[in-house]
Image: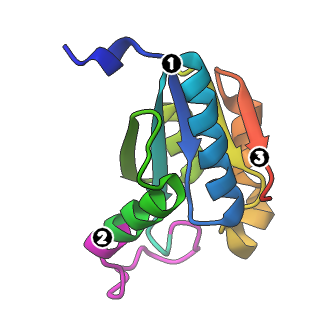
Amino acid sequence: MDANENAPRVVVGVDGSPSSHAALRWAIRHAALLGGVVDAVGAWEPPSHFGWSAPVVDPTFDRELADRRFADQLDTVIGPDQPVPVRRAMVLGDPTDVLLEAAQGAEVLVVGSHGHGGFTRALLGSVSTRVAQHADCPVVIVRAQ
């Protein structure tokens, strides 16, 4: 059995934005205080997810490239002296749904105040607002520094 399996979990949404990087740093500090682990979660959606037309395949989307960029940004933010275990997951789906599912049973869910959502997200409400309204655990919203 993995020793981290029963450790308190701090889930953090990471989308590459400055506020999500600040959220990741906050999550790591908090997990260190708890003796816990961090679950860093990224989400990606097909480009037509919010469109009114039939789904299309984005020929420019490269899952391996997305995974590599996600890993690179985590490595950059965390640095070489990782004080707590950080588990990584890049998941297909709506960011709000992905984060709410990942946060089930967590001590806290941490998100940045402004992500890379764009105009469509503005119409539907921000991810941070929606997770704060629906999460089963406490939610911390972190501003970029």
- Distance, label 1 to label 2, CA atoms, is 33 Å
Q: Secondary structure at mark 2?
A: helix
- Distance, label 2 to label 3, CA atoms, is 28 Å
Q: Mark yes or no: residue 43 visible.
A: yes
Name the residue: 39% across, 79% down.
Answer: 56
Q: Amino acid at mark 2?
A: Arg
Disc number at residue 79? Answer: none
- In this rendering, the answer to whether 131 lies above or below 103 is below
Q: Which residue is mark 2?
A: 63
Q: Looking at the picture, tell me which residue is in the foreground, 16 or 56.
A: 16
Q: Which residue is mark 3?
A: 142
- Is residue 59 on the magenta stretch? yes
Instruction: Give the quarter of the image for residue 63.
Output: bottom left
Q: Secondary structure at mark 1?
A: loop
Q: Secondary structure at mark 3?
A: strand
Q: Amino acid at mark 3?
A: Val
Name the mark nearer the viewer: 2 or 3: 3
Q: Looking at the picture, tell me which residue is in the foreground, 18 or 122.
A: 18
